[in-house]
Every structure is written in C-alpha cells, then in structure tokens.
Amino acid sequence: MSTSLLVWIILAPLLGAVLSGGLYLYHIKKEKISELTFALIGCITPFISFLITLSLFLRMKDEGIIFKQQLFTWINIDKLNIDMALLGDNLSIFMTMFVTFVGWLIHIYAIGYMRGDNGFGKFFAYFNLFLASMLILVLADNPIILFIGWEGVGVCSYLLIKFYYGKSENIIAANKAFIANRVGDFGFLLGVVTLFFALGEVDLSFGSIEANISNASNELLILSGFLLFVGAMGKSAQVPLYVWLPDAMAGPTPISALIHAATMVTAGVYMVARFHFLYSGIEEIGLFIAYIGAISALFAAVIATRQTDIKKILAYSTMSQLGYMFIAVGLGFYSTGLFHVFTHAFFKAMLFMGAGGIIIALHHEQNIFKIAQHRAQLPIIGATFLVGVIAISGIPPFSGFFSKDAILAAAFQEGEYLIWAIALGTAFLTAFYMFRMYFIIFIAPTKHKSQYTYTSKTITIPLLILAIGAIGAGFLNLPTIFGGEHLVDTWLGQLNSKTIHMSHSTEWILMITSIAVAAAGIYVSYKKYANFDVTKPEEEVGLIGNKFYVDEIYDAIFVKTSKRLSVFIDKVLDDKIIDGFIMNSSKGFVNLGKKVAMIQNANVRFYALFMLVGMTCVFIYLLTTLGL
C-alpha cells in the first residue's frame, strides 16, 4: 500500500539535524542560542518518527498490509534501474519501532549528559543525523538505498567518536573506526555488484531480487552472500574487523549508547535478515556466519574478563552479544536473532547510560577500580545497572534470558553442538565479567564515598523506562512452554525459514542448563569480587589483558607494512626510478642544448669561421662530384 508517511520517519530527525546545525553555526558566529532550543529540536524529532512508526504499525497489525513509497527514479541506465523508494514491511517497521523509541530516550539522556558542553548544539545535530541515517538503512527498499544509510551511520560515527577532537587519541580512534568500516563496506559494495550480475536485468528492489533469486547462478550467490557479510563483519564488529569498536568509546557516552543499542552495530544483523531469501539458499555461508558469530562471542567475552575501563567492558559485551545474533541468523532463525537485537537494545542502552551517569559523578573517571575507591551515592543508577547486568546474563524472567535461550535452543536443534557449547561457555563468561563489573563498582568494600548524590532527571527517567523494557520485553516472544504465543516470531513470520520445535522436556533441560551456567558465572564472580580489595586493582596484563595482541599484530602486518610500502614507493619507485629517469633524461637534453648553444654565442668572427668552413665543404663536394 502506498503512503507518504514513510519518508517523514526519516525527514523528522534529518530536518532536526539541519536545523540544529544551522542554529549552531549562528550560535558560534553571532548570537547565543539556548541549550533548551537544541534539546527540544533534538528530542522532539525522533519522537515524531516514533509516533509515525507506531501509527503504521497499528495499521499493519489491523489490516495486514505492507507500506511502500516511491519518491523518484534515481538511476535508469540500460539494465540498471534504481528507485529512491522506501519499504515499510513487518521487518523494517519492527526495527524502526525500537530504533526510534530507544533512540528518543537516548536523546533525552544526552540533554543531562551534555549539559554545559560548548558543542551542545553540534552534538544534537550529529545525533539527529545519525538516527536519520539508520532509518534510511532500515526503511530502504533496495540495497543501494540501504548502502546510503550504511555509509551515513559510518560517517556520523566518525564525527561523534572524534567529537572532542582536541585529544589526539580521539582522532586516532575515529580514524580507526572509519578505516576498519571502509574495509567492510568495500566488501558490501562488491556483494551488491555481484548480486546485480547474478540476477541480470531485474529491478534491484528487495521484492524483485527475492522473486528472481532462484534464476541466478549459485556460485555468484555464494560469493555475493559472503561479500555482503564482510560488510556486516565491519559494521557489527565481528572477528576479524572488530578492532574499531572498543576504541570507539572515545566519544561521549550517549553516542556509545546509540551505537551499541539502536543503530550502527545492529545494522549488520538487520542486513543479513533483510537478505534472508539469499542466505536461506546458501546454507554453507549461513553456517560460516554462525561460526564467525560464535567465535566473536567467545573471543570478546574472554577479553572482557580482564578489562578495567567500564565502557570498554560494555563494548566487548556488545561484540559478544552480536555474536549470539549472528549465530541465530546464520542458522536461519532470523526472527530469533532479531528478537535478541530487540531485547539487547533495552538493557545495553541502559547499561551505557548508567555507566555515563557514574562517569559524570566521578569526574569522567572510567577505571572500575578507581570508581569503586570513590563510590558515588547513585541509587537509581545502581538499581537500573543491576537490572541490566541480570538481563544480559540471561537470568529469568528478565528479557535477555528469553532471547538468548532461544538462540541456544536453535543451535542445539540444528545439531550444531559445537556452536551451542561455545555459546553456553560465553553465557558463563558474560555472567562472570558483567557481575565482576557490578560487584567492583557497587558492592566491594571501600573506605571513601563520594558526596555526589544528584543525578539529572533527564538521565534517571530514561533509565527507569529502559529498565521496564529490560525486565519485560522478553514476554513479547514468550515461548509456548510458558503459555506464550511467540508474538515477535509471528510478526516476523515472513523471515522464518526455520522455527524452534522440540519436546518440552528437551526445552526444559536446555533452559535449566542455561540458567545453571549463568548462575555459576555469577557465583564465581561473587566469590572473587564481592569483597575484593579495590585499592589493589587488577591490571590489563598478559595475553588476555592485552587483548591477544591483535592490535599489535594488525599494526605490524597492515599499518607498518603500508608505511614501508609507501616509503618504498616515495623514496625508491618515485624518487629514484620515475623521477630519476625523467631527471636524467632532462639533464641529457640540457647538456645537449648547452653544446648546441656553443655555436650560438653572438661572436661575428665565430659565425664567419663557420660560414667559411661551410663554403669550403660545399666547394669540396662540388669538386669531388663534378670531377672539376
């Protein structure tokens, strides 16, 4: 069904970004604009997007329709036809609902966090633009428009990570994120091009691709599926393109919350789900995706156990949880993976926002042991942080339990017992390192307590709302074993090539095993850290503490090699070979010119001598040839 509302979901935050950006320029050049003006623009526009999405969702629920909006034909050359068109189907509206809602709450939170910052208006301009880019990505009706949003979130992440560009480490972190994502994005673009050649002369809308996918070469589809996932590796920080994510914590905490909960890193999972019709036919690539997800989940969890920066612990936890999501979508359980995207958005946004509140209270201290040594009195943040830690650890009835348990069940049902075992081991580590962080920050004994007790309502109210979601969101997809109706799975029915179907006894055993493993992780963490001496902090040493030296390996293989190659090209190939050949050739011509110039010296007697010599030569020639 055609509608003109889809574009306004994007335009609302986009216009907010333009308006905030324009006012900020006016603010710094002519007249001061109040923070309240920027805050109102920044927060009202995402809420408008949410309300429009909610209205479309309710219509879809009642009438069972799909919305489309074609704005204009963008490219129409020979066999290539690309429309600037938007799609509001069950998948995109589902994603847009919680992206706009959680994004709106993070915008409200940012008011309190960024208060008094000189770049307040600029921040909200970037923030709105980030959300608009994600909405383009989600609502796109073809992969080219999706790629515009894909690149948009990459650019905005760069701008926000280096927001405090006065510090060189922030610039380095932003460059690292930008370059790592360009590697993945190049793979994504090659995947789209390969898909175009595989399909031939077809409209590149998702509907048209799905209708014609069976006619394409299987080899090209496999290559396209792999290359598209390379893009997801970069955007969603999976092995081996994950290295940018921990350093992205250099930006203000609200952007960390937005990146990890509702926008950039979830884009890769959404993209795989959007191409479900492609991956369902190339199960070998799907299994590859699942194994990459499992390896990434375990790898990140192991590293997180030794981190001391509160935001980096949460960053590695995001990478690990994304691994769970890729396990699900890789095995063909797309709605299961997206359900974990949905629940994760609530508790991960809440955890980052809680971390931001703690950081503000302790004057931007991020080391968990130093935070513990000067513990601030933050009851609301402490309570909501505990809710988030329990939810991500997979303890019932919190939301993370239902979504994570469904992924474990999917792996077990498919007979991928190694993936199931890796995911189960990761669940133990997740509970361990998340409660390690909680026990150190809030429970471990300390002699000093900060007098800081005030927290802005723009920080605490979003936290309380997200806490409700972190507790109750799982009930929206309650399994039949608890009398539920799998509402999320039903809504996303178009994606489900596979569903979980096993005996209740097997399901109970898997659930109890999952809970027992998480409880064991909590117990081990409690025994070690609940009474930990925070004045003797752990250090990031050894193989795990140094993150398996992956950054150093990448630096040696790629960065230093590139520098050596550039030096070789500049000093040897360019200076000595290319420039040497040109300069030596020019010197030869110069020397020849100098010798020729010797006869052009303006000396009349010299010229007379040459004339006499010339005439003599002519006479000798005549005498010789004519026989005179």
Image (spheres, rainbow, N blue to C red):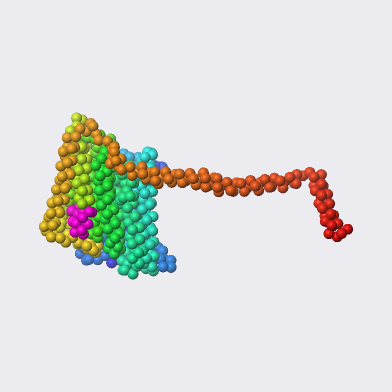
588 within the magenta span: no
Front position in the image: 400 or 21? 400
Magenta stretch, overall SS:
helix
Asked if residue 361 is positioned above or below residue 391 in the image, the reply reads above
Where is residue 479 shown, x and y percent of the image? 15, 58
406 within the magenta span: yes
Front position in the image: 23 or 228? 228
Q: Most extreme residue toward the right, as rendered?
A: 628
Asked if residue 448 is positioned above or below residue 291 in the image, the reply reads above
Q: Most extreme residue toward the top, as rendered?
A: 447
Whether residue 105 is visible, yes or no, is no
Where is residue 129 shown, x and y percent of the image? 34, 51
Q: Which residues are magenta?
A: 403-420
In the image, taking residue 108 as reference, residue 505 lies left or right, namely left
Whether residue 509 is visible, yes or no, is yes
Where is residue 385 shown, x and y percent of the image? 20, 43
In the image, taking residue 446 as reference, residue 146 lies left or right, namely right
- Going 32% across and 54% down the picture, which residue do you hit? 232
Quarter of the figure with the N terminus: bottom left
